[in-house]
């Protein structure tokens, strides 16, 4: 946190961990048989996800997982097990003594997937013309705003292989924030320079999912070979990818990856057990079922420790109106949602220990913070972070103290007699989230609230967050990051994934009367202060204060952190599964091998 990233997740929180590593849907039997025979001659493995991609354009994406796990590369990356920065397209980088200039040196002889040279001109184009372009609604820019004025870095080409970034002041997260994928200037420059009838760059409609996937030029380990909506995406090895092993052999080793698009976690599990899938992310319930099949099924279940990121419910705090004057949120409901006592009452009413035991089978921990527990900046309850232990009586007392009342039927009403009733949404494809929502509905009805649980398609949910903003309450998950600044697109008030109070965004109709709360302004200030500070102890204190504010104001009510679990066929080697990196078994994708 966005949507989920992120990703992408390496430089920002990207929206919605829909579910990573999931399988193979059936077309007609003849079609499937021909598909298998045609691909039996090359090394490949099959994994999956719950929903179709929303875009093939990285700059416009804010959901995770996404195609860019396979196709894109930035100047630097992260070691998925340690969080350390590692060279990617750039072989090295150097920071000046005054910490306001950073010089990246690209690897020699880099090429795009179409064989064209990848040079410093592509780096300049990617950042200057796309990520730092205010006309492009991208989450990447949020993490690169510096100081109170939100000044953006400037770039200078030093040579075909060197680019210098300059910041107006020292900016501690700068290297990690420059991990966004590099995009091809020779393909996309024209779409930036030309505009549509509304004056928006054609880039905003470039590389949509209606694009022939073979036309998407990339620098990552794989290119897209084909895309059949609601069925699969096939990736093939990028012959121009830079990475080689210690013996000089080209990577990635695997020739083809099949990414199946499956509409439910139940179907994913069925497909894995039938042998049609080589990897699957596991819920705690599925872990209990599959563990006893591990030897017979010839797979290994990996435990990556606590999963990076957060699970939460959130209320829509947006008090803005559309250009036509219609409130984004029903004014009656808005009075409830913007009342801190109301949100705190909901937090006390949710029985998270029971959720941990029943929904997660005890495989996880209670969650209290927007920062992942693996991060060195995590501020724990033992250190003083406020928690909301299950206490329905305290929840009712808070509501009564805030002017709510109970009718003769025991249902909660506001001070004007309006029954407290709202809609809770989540993505229908995710069975675990559905179970969490069912318990939350039950818990809140126990304190008199009426909750309408309405599961919707993942992409429809993202549309509500990104564009229409017409929702009451939702249950989501966000990917995490080592440095809290990676969540600036979610937590700063002008961030493009600040979904609980989303302000105006480029290319969208204007909003009227959008309100930024005082506590949001304080979080903005803390993120600016944290980015300026290079002393790690002082940075930890700054981000601890941010976590305290979030737990006091509760724009998100945190639930449970599960363990990261994945089942992988033993035919796949070099697996280094981790819970720290949202890519799980795929963070070291070029190193994976298939043994058949």
Image (cartoon, grey):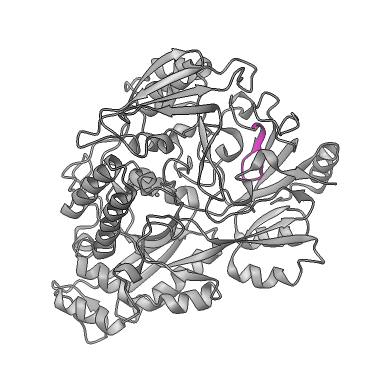
Please determine whether, in this image, residue 121 is positioned above or below residue 568. Answer: above
Q: In the image, what residue occupies the spot 32% across and 54% down?
A: 540
Please determine whether, in this image, residue 215 is positioned above or below residue 542. Answer: above
In front here: 294 or 97? 97
In the visual, does 492 lie left or right of 210? left
The reply to whether the magenta stretch includes residue 147 is: no
In front here: 596 or 61? 596
In the visual, does 148 lie left or right of 4? left
Q: Of all residues shown, which one is farthest toward the front?
A: 97
Q: Which residues are magenta?
A: 222-232
Please determine whether, in this image, residue 104 is positioned above or below residue 170. Answer: above
In the visual, does 262 lie left or right of 153? right
In front here: 595 or 256? 595
Q: Looking at the picture, how far across and down is residue 551, in whole percent?
A: 28, 64
Residue 493 appears in the picture as rendered:
no
Q: In the image, what residue occupies the spot 64% across and 19% down?
A: 114
Identify the image quadrant of residue 265.
bottom right
Number of marks: 0
Q: Of all residues shown, which one is farthest toward the top?
A: 159
Identify the image quadrant of residue 560.
bottom left
Q: Looking at the picture, how far across and down is residue 120, in whole percent?
A: 48, 17
Residue 167 appears in the picture as rendered:
yes
* Secondary structure mainly formed by the magenta segment: strand
The reply to whether the magenta stretch includes residue 231 is: yes
Identify the image quadrant of residue 547.
bottom left
Q: Looking at the picture, how far across and down is residue 184, in whole percent?
A: 52, 21
Q: Looking at the picture, how far across and down is residue 522, in whole percent?
A: 19, 51
């Amino acid at each position: 946190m966005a949507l989920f990233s992120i990703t992408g997740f390496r430089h920002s929180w990207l929206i919605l961990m829909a579910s990573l590593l999931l399988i193979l849907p059936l077309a007609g039997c003849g079609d499937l048989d021909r598909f298998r025979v045609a691909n039996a001659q090359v090394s490949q493995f099959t994994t999956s996800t719950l929903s179709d991609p929303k875009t093939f354009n990285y700059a416009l994406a804010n959901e995770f997982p996404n195609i860019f796990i396979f196709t894109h590369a930035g100047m630097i990356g992260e070691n998925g097990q340690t969080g350390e920065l590692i060279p990617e397209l750039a072989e090295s980088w150097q920071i000046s003594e005054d910490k306001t200039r950073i010089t990246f040196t690209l690897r020699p002889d880099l090429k795009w997937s179409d064989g064209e040279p990848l040079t410093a001109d592509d780096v300049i184009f990617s950042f200057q013309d796309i990520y730092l372009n205010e006309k492009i609604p991208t989450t990447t820019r949020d993490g690169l705003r510096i100081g109170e004025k939100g000044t953006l870095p400037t770039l200078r080409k030093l040579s075909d292989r060197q680019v210098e970034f300059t910041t107006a002041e020292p900016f501690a997260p700068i290297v990690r924030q420059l991990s966004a994928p590099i995009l091809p200037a020779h393909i996309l420059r024209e779409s930036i320079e030309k505009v549509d009838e509304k004056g928006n760059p054609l880039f905003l409609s470039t590389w949509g999912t209606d694009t022939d996937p073979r036309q998407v030029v990339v620098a990552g380990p794989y290119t897209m070979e084909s895309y059949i909506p609601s069925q699969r995406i096939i990736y093939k090895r990028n012959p121009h990818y830079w990475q080689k092993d210690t013996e000089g052999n080209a990577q990635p080793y695997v020739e083809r990856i099949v990414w199946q698009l499956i509409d439910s976690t139940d179907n994913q599990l069925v497909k894995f057990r039938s042998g049609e899938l080589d990897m699957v992310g596991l819920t705690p319930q599925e872990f209990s079922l599959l563990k006893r099949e591990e030897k017979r099924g010839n797979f290994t279940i990996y435990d990556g420790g606590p999963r990076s990121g957060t699970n939460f419910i959130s209320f829509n705090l947006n008090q803005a109106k559309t250009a036509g004057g219609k409130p984004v949120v029903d004014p009656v409901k808005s009075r409830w949602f913007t009342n801190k006592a109301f949100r705190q009452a909901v937090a006390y009413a949710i029985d998270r220990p029971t959720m941990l035991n029943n929904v997660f089978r005890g495989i996880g921990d209670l969650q209290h913070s927007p920062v992942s527990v693996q991060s060195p900046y995590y501020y724990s309850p033992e250190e003083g972070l406020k928690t909301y232990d299950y206490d329905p009586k305290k929840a009712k007392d808070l509501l009564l103290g805030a002017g709510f009342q109970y009718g003769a039927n025991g249902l909660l009403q506001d001070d004007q007699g309006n029954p407290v009733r709202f809609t809770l949404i989540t993505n229908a494809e995710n069975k675990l989230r559905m179970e969490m929502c069912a318990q939350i509905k039950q818990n809140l009805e126990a304190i008199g609230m009426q909750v309408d649980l309405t599961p919707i398609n993942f992409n429809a949910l993202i549309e509500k967050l990104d564009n229409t903003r017409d929702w009451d309450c939702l249950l989501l998950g966000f990917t995490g990051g080592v440095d809290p600044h990676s969540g600036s697109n979610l937590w700063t008030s002008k961030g493009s994934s600040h979904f609980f109070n989303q302000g105006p965004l480029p290319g969208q109709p204007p909003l009227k009367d959008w309100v930024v709360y005082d506590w949001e302004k304080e979080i903005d200030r803390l993120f600016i202060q944290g980015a300026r500070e290079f002393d790690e102890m002082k940075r930890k204190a700054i981000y601890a204060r941010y976590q305290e504010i979030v737990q006091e104001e509760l724009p998100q009510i945190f639930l449970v952190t599960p363990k990261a679990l994945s089942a992988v066929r033993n035919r796949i080697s070099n697996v280094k599964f981790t819970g720290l990196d949202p890519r799980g078994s795929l963070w070291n994708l070029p190193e994976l091998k298939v043994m058949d």
